[in-house]
Amino acid sequence: MITAGRDLYDDPRFFEGYRRLRNAESGINDAIEIPAMNRMLPRVAGTAVVDLGCGAGGLARRLADAGAAHVVAVDSARRMPALAIPHPRVRYLRADLDELTLPARSADLVVSSLALHYVADYAGLVRRVAHWLRPGGRFVFSVEHPICTAADPMTGWRATDDGALWPVDDYATEGPRTQNWIIEGVEKHHRQVATLIGVLLAAGLELTGIDEPVPGPATLQSHPHLAEHLRRPPLLVLAARRRPVDPAKGVS
């Protein structure tokens, strides 16, 4: 089994397969996830941003190009800098998200693109994110939809006499899941939608947005193979914020 997050992208077989997949620009990242994240993100001009699980740094660079003052782009994989394009306002940091520490109230925006389903201690990370955010700061992230991660193992579409069906089983049993994706034995963590949202609220954050994006007509015209995602949402995108300072109380 490939350990979630830390070891996965340093596996040479996975890394090469992932590189080919992203270069093709035909998957859900470019066609579904990036537009959904863009709809949820606040204005970033002049902000301090942290990108958790930055991968090759695409989101970090887009935010810097949109005017972010600086972006700390964090990933645990040694191989990812090989894909990253340098940017004067992006600083790449190699660190495990389960262990990452940053100064309190140092970020206006924390983002994560399809990485938090690799994190074992989601609740602990969210508490740290809340600690890093300044009053009014935002947290926007995407994960694989819990409908997709529920079954163990994550077998994907199953052929039946009535056609291909997506199995949803063991939804309430949270924890590690295995999946054959690019290579065999990839480990991810399944959590219910209620858990993903409830942990944000328990950390003192306010939920400001939720989306289950699917491909629209224009996307399907150029990427017809993505039509299967109309049958079940592939992604969940959540947005939250730390409460702003209350002028009457002088505290956040």
Image (tube, rainbow, N blue to C red):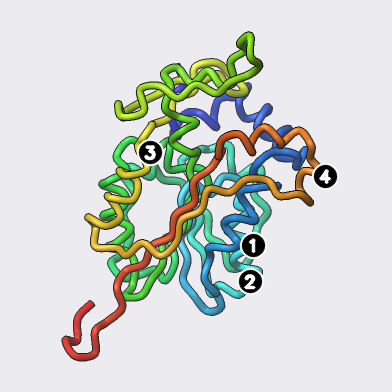
Label 3: which residue?
Answer: 119
Q: Amino acid at mark 1?
A: Arg
Give neighbour class at mark 1: few <14, some 14-19, many 20+ (Cα, 10 Å): few
Give SS at disc 4.
helix
**Which residue appears farthest toward the bottom when viewing the image?**
248
Nearer the N terminus, badge 3 or badge 1?
Answer: 1
Give SS at disc 3.
loop
Task: Tell me the distance, in whole angstroms, between the alpha carbons under discs 3 and 4.
Answer: 35 Å
Q: Amino acid at mark 2?
A: Ala
Give neighbour class at mark 3: few <14, some 14-19, many 20+ (Cα, 10 Å): many
Q: Amino acid at mark 4?
A: Gln
Task: Tell me the distance, in whole angstroms, between the alpha carbons under discs 2 and 3.
Answer: 28 Å
* Most foreground residue, 243 or 77: 243
The picture places residue 106, in percent across and down from the top left corner, at 36, 70
Q: Quadrant of residue 128?
A: bottom left
Q: Is residue 133 visible?
A: yes
The answer to whether residue 169 is above or below residue 147 is above
Specify the quadrant that holds the C terminus: bottom left
The residue at the point 66 percent across, 44 percent down is: 83
Nearer the N terminus, badge 2 or badge 3?
Answer: 2
Label 2: which residue?
Answer: 66
**Residue 221 marker:** 4
The answer to whether residue 131 is above or below residue 156 is below
Q: Amino acid at mark 3?
A: Val
The answer to whether residue 178 is above or below residue 189 is above
The picture places residue 8, in percent across and down from the top left corner, at 51, 28
**Residue 62 marker:** 1
Looking at the rendered structure, the number of numbered marks drawn on it comes to 4
The residue at the point 42 percent across, 71 percent down is: 108
Specify the quadrant that holds the N terminus: top left
Give SS at disc 2.
loop
